[in-house]
């Protein structure tokens, strides 16, 4: 039943198709980390993104050679991540 509802959902919500496939992992960037350590921090929403910003800052200070990847599940969380964690190597 849920699958049969997807075409209607995609046609009603202008940006939902893009978001839906991104949440399934399509369009995830290729992370070229080489020999560097990768620290991946996931925050679901705007509030969680604000909450992890000091943690990510501390992680980067203690591991300056590491790459930081910040992932979020909401559009507002993504916007906040780019604003409060601008030094991250990847925002997805």
Image (tube, helix red, strand yellow):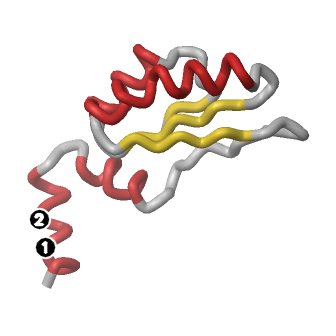
Looking at this view, is 13 or 48 the one in front? 48
The image quadrant that residue 36 belongs to is: top right
Question: Where is residue 69 shown, x and y percent of the image?
Answer: 59, 36
Contact, mark 2 vs mark 1 (Cβ under 8 Å): yes
Looking at this view, is 7 or 81 the one in front? 81
On screen, residue 73 versus residue 2, left or right, reads: right
Residue on which the image places disc 2: 8
Report the label total. 2
On screen, residue 62 versus residue 86, left or right, reads: right
The image quadrant that residue 11 belongs to is: bottom left
Looking at this view, is 66 or 59 the one in front? 59
Q: How busy is the neighbourhood of tag 1: few (under 14 within 10 Å), some, or many (20 plus)?
A: few
At 42% across and 16% down in the image, what residue appears?
Answer: 84
Q: How busy is the neighbourhood of tag 2: few (under 14 within 10 Å), some, or many (20 plus)?
A: few
Question: Where is residue 18 shown, x and y percent of the image?
Answer: 34, 48
Q: Which mark is residue 72?
A: none
Furthest toward the right, the residue is: 35
Question: Where is residue 74 shown, x and y percent of the image?
Answer: 29, 40
Above or below: residue 89 compared with residue 61: below
Above or below: residue 69 compared with residue 6: above
Say which quadrant the N terminus sits in: bottom left
At 56% across and 48% down in the image, what residue appears?
Answer: 28
SS for callout 2: helix
Above or below: residue 2 compared with residue 41: below
The image quadrant that residue 30 belongs to is: top right
Furthest toward the bottom, the residue is: 1
In whole angstroms, how far apart are the C-alphas of marks 2 and 1? Answer: 6 Å
Question: Where is residue 3 shown, x and y percent of the image?
Answer: 22, 78
SS for callout 1: helix
Q: Which mark is residue 5?
A: 1
At 75% across and 25% down in the image, what residue appears?
Answer: 63
């Amino acid at each position: 039943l849920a699958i049969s509802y997807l075409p209607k959902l995609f046609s009603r919500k202008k940006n939902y198709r893009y978001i839906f496939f991104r949440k399934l992992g399509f369009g995830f960037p290729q992370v070229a980390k080489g020999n560097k350590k990768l620290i991946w921090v996931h925050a679901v929403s705007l509030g969680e993104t604000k909450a992890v910003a000091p943690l990510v800052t501390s992680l980067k200070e203690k591991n300056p050679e590491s790459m930081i990847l910040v992932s979020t599940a909401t559009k507002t969380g993504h916007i906040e991540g780019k604003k409060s964690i601008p030094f991250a190597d990847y925002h997805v």
